[in-house]
Amino acid sequence: MRLFSGLSLEGPIPDHTTIMNFRHLLERHGLARQMLEEINQWLVDAGVLLKEGTLIDATLIEAPSSTKNKANARDPEMHHTKKGNQWYFGMKAHIGVDARTGLTHSFTTTAANEHDLNQAKHVLHGDETYVFADSGYRGAEKREELKDFAVDWYIAEQPSKTKELKKHPRLNKKPIQLEYLKASIRAKVEHPFRIIKCQFGFTKARYRGMLKNDNKLAMLFTLANVVRVDQMLRA
């Protein structure tokens, strides 16, 4: 980190307070999101980030549920939600990803109990011609706020229906193949989540409030795009 930042041991090294003040500066002026937009525009100009199609998805990010703090309460902007048979407390990151490269072009930050479909409009850039999403986005084409988007929707079937199709594989060969095709294309939307969680270690929210965590995610997705391009160049 010292070498990357161009810091020398001959001079003073920024301490924790200096780094915190810099983070607050980014938060006050929304600079992290501006950096994401600047990097993405550079990728568009370079012909790396395309706008033909978008993959949309959301991921849960847990927050500390303990009340052992100065306020003696949990973060009021975070909420509980149930996924499968397990309850989570925290927030959600909703993203729109370029279908060809897996680069994040837009995202929103909400409480964990926000339905994925409510944020679909905000993670589309408007120039795409097709959208892939999981079964949580079924009915998107009927939503009033999405009617102006002239796109082809490729939404995965409900898991229960897919399970029924697989009971008769010969009769349902084409529908099953279609679901596999949707899943293989949607797989790229998981790449940014893998980078920020596995490589950057952002598995739990470290700050209180949406503003601070939104700023953190904006910077992480910006760096994730740089990492993704590096991976593409190496390949």
Image (tube, rainbow, N blue to C red):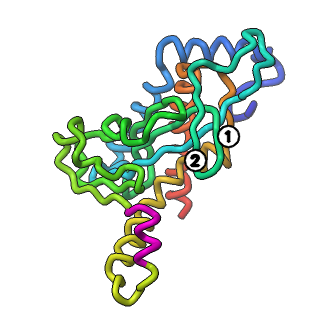
- Between 48 and 156, the residue placed more toward the observer is 156
Kind of residue at badge 2: Lys
Q: Residue at x 53, y 53 (%)?
A: 191
The answer to whether residue 16 is above or below residue 185 is above
Q: Does residue 130 show up magenta in the picture?
A: no
Looking at the picture, how far across and down is residue 149, in whole percent? 20, 43
Residue 181: horizontal and vertical position, in percent? 38, 71
Image coordinates of residue 137 in percent, x first then y, are: 37, 49
Residue placed under numbered mark 1 in the picture: 203
For residue 179, say whether it is visible: yes
Closer mark to the observer between disc 2 and disc 1 = 2
For badge 1, the amino acid type reads Thr
Q: Earlier in the sequence, mark 2 or mark 1?
A: 2
Considering the numbered disc 2 on the image, is that residue within a helix, a strand or a loop?
strand
**Residue at x 39% of width, y 41% of height:** 105
Q: Give the labeled residue for mark 2.
A: 83
3D distance between C-alphas at marks 2 and 1 = 16 Å
> From the image, which quarter does the N terminus lie in?
top right
Q: Nearer the viewer, residue 69 or 99?
A: 69
In terms of depth relative to the viewer, which is nearer, 169 or 132? Answer: 169
Q: Residue sitting at 32 percent across and 50 percent down? A: 50
Q: Does residue 88 sit above or below 198 in this rendering?
A: above
Q: Which region of the structure is painted magenta?
A: 157-165
Q: Would you say residue 161 sits in the magenta stretch?
A: yes
Residue 127 % position (x, y): 23, 44
Is 110 placed above or below 138 here? above
Spot the residue most to the right. 9
Callouts 2 and 1 close, C-beta under 8 Å: no
